[in-house]
Image (spheres, rainbow, N blue to C red):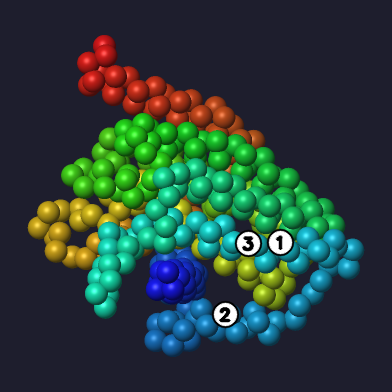
Amino acid sequence: MLAAIVIAVIKMLVLFAVLMLFVAYGTLAERKVSGHIQDRLGPLYCGPHGFLQPFADGLKLFFKEDIVAKESDKFLYFLAPMIAIVPAILAIGVIPFGESITLFGRKINLVMTDINVALLYLLAVSSFSVYTIVFGGWSANSKYPLLGGLRSAAQFISYELILGLSIMGVIMIVGSFSLVDIVHYQKGMWMVVYQPLAFIIYMVAATAELNRLPFDLPEAESELVGGYHTEYSSMKFAMFFLGEYANMVITSAVAVCLFLGGWYSPVPFLSWVPGPIWFVVKLVAVFFFLLWLRWTYPRFRYDQLMGFSWKYLLPLALINILATGGVMLFLQGGI
């Protein structure tokens, strides 16, 4: 019993450390990718090729003057940035990074816990993110942050519905809500082959849930000054961005599990490469796509954002579910 508790604690610490490392260098990757897209170099002076820039940013923000909005609701004002990263920390516990490894004669599964309703758990946890923005926008008692918070509530409700519908086809095919079962099902063929439309819808809806361009209407610097975090500074300001990049990592990891074969090799002759390495390679590829997307497309207008969700993505998601069910029924001889 004691050994199991120790292993669980070590797993939690390792997962948290890996997540924070991804988040730190995700910010550097963002600046490097944007720099090359815009024909410039990005950070160069902190360490070789700017490799120590995340540490410099953290040090600067830690010692930066902390300004508190005078008329704010202090409890929610301080709570909002504190809970920004909580959804990602809760979600990483059900992400499988591989099958298992043997250390000191003990078999260790490369997932914190394999629950049979992992997808439902992830949807529940991801919906928690909206409170960070709504609390931050409302508690500041300022007009621009309030508008950002209101926009966020409507955007999250709209695109979380689409996100849930996009994965229904995967659940129907596999017959399980467990991410481990879904990855095992893809040993021979990735789910993106069976569900290409669902993958596209998932990525679009997930980008909107992350508040990333072209769906960053809760921030919208050109019209809301910065949106929900306008009245934040120092480490409280940084916590919002830590939450954003942590959620990007989780979103990328879930996409890998659902559609890209998890830890399985894309080609048989490279199956000797350890599964966790393949998982990380795929995760980085999806993460890079999210960065690339941000610096490629302009921001939607808010009416376009909502119309795109209800007029286009919702019907497409429902059509995908109907088509998946029809094909499954046909293959089972029901038609």
Neighbourhood count class around disc 3 (C-alpha, 10 Å): few under 14, some 14–19, many 20 upward: many
Tell me the quadrant of the picture where the N terminus can be found.
Answer: bottom left
For mark 3, what is the residue? 84
Q: Disc 2 and disc 3: Cα gap in Å? A: 18 Å
Mark 1 and mark 2 residues within 8 Å of each other at the beta carbon: no
Q: Disc 1 and disc 2: Cα gap in Å? A: 21 Å
Checking the image for residue 51, the label placed there is: none
Against 187, is 233 above or below? below
For badge 3, the amino acid type reads Ala
Measured as percent of width and height from the top left, residue 274 is found at 21, 65
Against 109, is 256 above or below? above
Neighbourhood count class around disc 2 (C-alpha, 10 Å): few under 14, some 14–19, many 20 upward: some
Q: Is residue 302 visible?
A: no
For mark 2, what is the residue? 57
* Front position among marks 1 and 2: 1
For badge 1, the amino acid type reads Ala
